[in-house]
Image (cartoon, grey):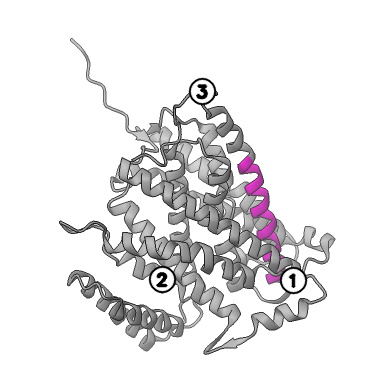
Amino acid sequence: MPVNTPRRRSFFPEPDLRESSYLGDLLRREAVGGTIALVAAVVAVVWANSMWGASYDDFRGLEVGPLDLEHWAADGALTLFFFVAGLELKREFVVGSLRRPADAAVPVVAAACGVAVPAVVYLAANTSMAGGHPDGWAIPAATDIAFALAVLAVVGSNLPSALRAFLLTLAVVDDLIVIVIIATFYTSTLHLVPLALAGAALVAWVVLQQLRVRTPFLYVPLAVAAWWCVHESGIHATIAGVALGLLTRVRPDEGEERSPAERLEHLLSPLSSAVAVPFFALLSAGVVLSGGGDLARDPVVIGVVLGLVVGKPIGVFGGTWVLTRVTRAELNPDLSYRDVVGVAVLAGIGFTVSLLVSDLSFSGAERDAAKTAVLVGSVVSAVLGALLLGRRDRGSRPPPGDDRRLNTGNRR
């Protein structure tokens, strides 16, 4: 008589057909946006270290309305970035491949470990060395969605779409955790009246969603009001973007081709990845590269670089490996733990959010040192991840004349 054995759930589930097509479109946008942001970052570094370096500082300090350009980039442009991230996160958990808790557990645990281990590595370096600055522990905790997906799109055209979906979810959950950290640990003063007004604006957003109101003439003023009130409350303004994204409806009604979240993502993702993030990179990445020997001995630099290059891979891979060992989850047959290592290394690309946390953690020379370390650690992680996944990608290509498509990212 046959014995029934419990069915093991496949880890990194394949996205369904609609999700797969959506993922392919998203990767193409992020590849372009990541390239533009990289160019903007290079321009910022060259400009800041050129004979016109003083004009770069003047440019960042240029007042436009209530804020200067540097704060418009960090508080304004990144709010759009995190609004899109909030939409992506809710979509994944409500109607995407992570709507089942068993499927969501692994990337969520991997993201949490990928935040915790780099923070521990940073603290170990900055509490054990003279002149350490433990306050920057959250700097190496973030993964940059645009850059990580851009590298994956460039080197991994034949990688399984399940691996791409995992990186996307990992990066979005990672950013959400870091945003919670920013709201919790980087809020020095809290003004209750603006916070209450921000809450009222968010409630109005939800009501309009429930009433199926579609006109932007109501939503745009509400979003601006919520953003400004959160900014004035003392909480970082990007929190408003995440909150609005998470409160947007993601299930289409009967007869509705696309939900509001899907329409907004389609409209705003190119603007976020090709304008908002490069604008922030241009205004934030311009650090003066001097004192190389001193930087190499700076505990902040050591902590950030080790956190991104060593801590991130250990956290992401370790969390994945442990959870798949203590549960019934198993790897997708198309994947191996070597693939997980490649994605874990790629998760060390901190860039956008790490630069933001550097601004919030330090000022003056230590801020520049932290940003320099973010750039170095992100570049090293990108190169190592590209090498690991590039080799896997080449090994996955069908032989000449074979029409099989291993990449399911564009299936219909």
Question: What amino acid is at disc 2?
Answer: Gly
Q: Kindly identify which numbered label has been placed on residue 76.
A: none
Q: Residue at x 26, y 26 (%)?
A: 6
* Residue 311 in the image: above or below residue 361: above
Q: Which residue bears the numbered disc 3?
A: 401
Q: How many marks?
A: 3
Q: Position of residue 70 (x, y in %)?
A: 60, 78
Q: Nearer the viewer, residue 119 or 378?
A: 378
Q: On the rendered image, what quadrant is the N terminus found in?
A: top left
- Left or right of 386 in this view: 191: left
Q: Magenta residues, as a range?
A: 366-386
Label 2 crowd (10 A; few <14 / some 14-19 / many >=20):
many
Q: Residue at x 52, y 69 (%)?
A: 276
Q: Which residue bears the numbered disc 1?
A: 47
* Residue 248 in the image: above or below residue 339: below
Farthest residue, direction left: 254
Q: Position of residue 378 (x, y in %)?
A: 64, 54
Residue 379 belongs to magenta span: yes
Q: Which residue bears the numbered disc 2?
A: 241
Locate residue 385: give its quadrant: top right
